[in-house]
Image: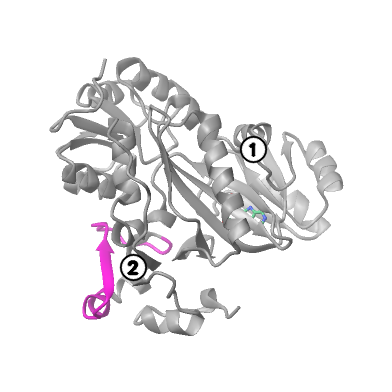
């Protein structure tokens, strides 16, 4: 049994070697913990700052066993581990959040069923196991709609927009593996997320809702706080809390939501781990999402998720934005973060930049574009 709170110098096992693991390990180190990372990549962002790594596949029992034996408690920065892998890890060490939580977040039909049963509204949806079921679902939900794979989708992969009847058959053929899920297209006013943490004792803390702008299905810009009415922000907070409690969460959770044109808040996705839309908390909060993550899984007290500044967080995606790094470093006021990835690819998140503003002074679109120069701000900051 792992004693809680985890004593200083104990080792936290992190499944996944990406930037979320890297920033979690940095927060853990500040609290006096070491991290051991399971990753199939020898040169991963998290491994650069970890005390140790197990190099191996997430599906490989020998690698999972070796990894678990290095850690007092196990957590995730990457959700797509097989159910068998999860069970093996959980038989060896406490896994936080629990495998049950991970299973819900891994599969969109399970996730949406869970959310609706917990009383959380989503876009209307239907499971699609066959071509006939898809026709029935399109007839029921109407078009436009989005057809998605139920597993392994991220950054817009594994989904197709269906606008016209002719789109339906090719999308069905293209998207694999099945089953799929069809969702009504939400004509949203904006996309928001709330990141919250919950301890084993039920203690709870949540950051203010933030506004997320995507480009090519990849998060481009997060504005903290979201520019939404107070009642909408309160509704978003209520959704996050309800989800965290229904999951009996121990750890960190991001809830992505749409604010519909009529002001309703609809949950889209949950991620029981640090989230890209929470990177601004590193610079704008006394305790970041990564610190709250570590505290929650280590059984430390959870501080309130306070924000001392407003913030804009811009992702650095692919070679073109990475090429701006020298100018970014030379611009006072931009807070630079680089993830240590050696391979640069289109669509790959290489780092991010945060700009802080006094509370209540988040600028409008033109001020924001100026504040984030030299990063080209495109259609993402459309005037409102
Ligand atoms: P997801 O993989 O579910 O997070 O979807 C990626 C992005 O696609 C979201 O952030 C939205 O911008 C868009 N999207 C997904 N589902 C819907 C929906 N039902 N209605 C409108 N836009 C959606």
Answer with the quadrant where ligand 1 appears in the image.
bottom right
Determine whether the beta carbon of the residue marked 1 sits less than 8 angstroms from the nearest atom of ligand 1. no
Residue 362's tag is: none
| 321 horizontally vs 271: left or right | left
Q: Which residue is mark 1?
A: 112
Q: How far from the left and from the top, in percent, is residue 372?
A: 37, 78
Q: Is residue 336 magenta?
A: yes
Residue 81: which quarter of the image?
A: top left
Q: How far from the left and from the top, in percent, is residue 197?
A: 41, 40
Q: Residues within 10 Å of mark 1 (few under 14, many from 20)?
A: many
Where disc 1 sits, the SS reads: helix
Magenta segment, which residues? 325-347
Q: Earlier in the sequence, mark 1 or mark 2?
A: 1
- Visual colour scheme: one colour
Q: Which residue is mark 2?
A: 354
Q: Residue at x 40, y 84 (%)?
A: 370
Q: Is residue 77 magenta?
A: no
Determine whether the beta carbon of the residue marked 2 sits less than 8 angstroms from the nearest atom of ligand 1. no
Q: How far from the left and from the top, in percent, is residue 282?
A: 30, 57
């Amino acid at each position: 049994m792992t004693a809680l709170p985890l004593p200083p110098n104990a080792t936290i096992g992190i499944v996944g070697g990406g930037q979320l693991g890297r920033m979690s390990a940095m927060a853990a180190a500040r609290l006096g913990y070491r991290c051991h990372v399971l990753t199939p990549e020898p040169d991963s962002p998290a491994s650069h700052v970890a005390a140790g790594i197990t190099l191996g596949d997430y599906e490989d029992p020998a690698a999972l066993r070796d990894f678990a034996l290095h850690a007092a408690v196990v957590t995730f920065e990457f959700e797509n581990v097989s159910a068998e892998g999860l069970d093996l890890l959980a038989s060896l060490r406490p896994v936080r959040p629990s495998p049950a939580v991970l299973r819900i977040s891994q599969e969109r039909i399970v996730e949406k069923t869970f959310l609706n049963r917990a009383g959380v509204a989503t876009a209307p949806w239907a499971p699609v196991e066959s071509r006939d079921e898809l026709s029935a679902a399109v007839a029921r939900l109407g078009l436009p709609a989005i057809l998605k794979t139920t597993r392994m989708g991220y950054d817009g992969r594994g989904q197709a927009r269906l606008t016209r009847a002719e789109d339906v058959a090719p999308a069905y053929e293209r998207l694999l593996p099945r089953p799929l899920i069809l969702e009504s297209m939400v004509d949203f006013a904006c996309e928001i997320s709330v990141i919250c943490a919950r301890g084993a004792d039920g203690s709870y803390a949540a950051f203010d809702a933030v506004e997320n702008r995507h480009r090519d299905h990849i998060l481009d810009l997060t504005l903290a706080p979201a520019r939404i009415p107070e009642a909408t922000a309160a509704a978003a907070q209520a959704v996050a809390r309800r989800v965290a409690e229904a999951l009996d969460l121990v750890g960190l959770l991001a809830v992505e939501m749409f604010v519909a044109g009529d002001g309703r808040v609809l949950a889209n996705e949950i991620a029981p781990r640090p989230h890209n839309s929470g990177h601004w908390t590193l610079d704008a909060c006394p305790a970041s999402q990564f610190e709250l993550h570590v505290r929650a899984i280590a059984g430390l007290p959870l501080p309130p998720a306070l924000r001392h500044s407003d913030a804009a967080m811009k992702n650095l995606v692919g070679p073109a934005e990475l090429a701006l790094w020298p100018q970014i470093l030379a611009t006072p006021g931009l807070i630079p973060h680089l993830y240590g990835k050696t391979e640069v690819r289109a669509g790959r998140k290489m780092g991010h930049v945060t700009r802080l503003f006094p509370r209540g002074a988040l600028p409008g679109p033109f001020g924001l574009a100026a504040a984030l120069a030299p990063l080209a701000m495109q259609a993402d900051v459309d005037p409102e």
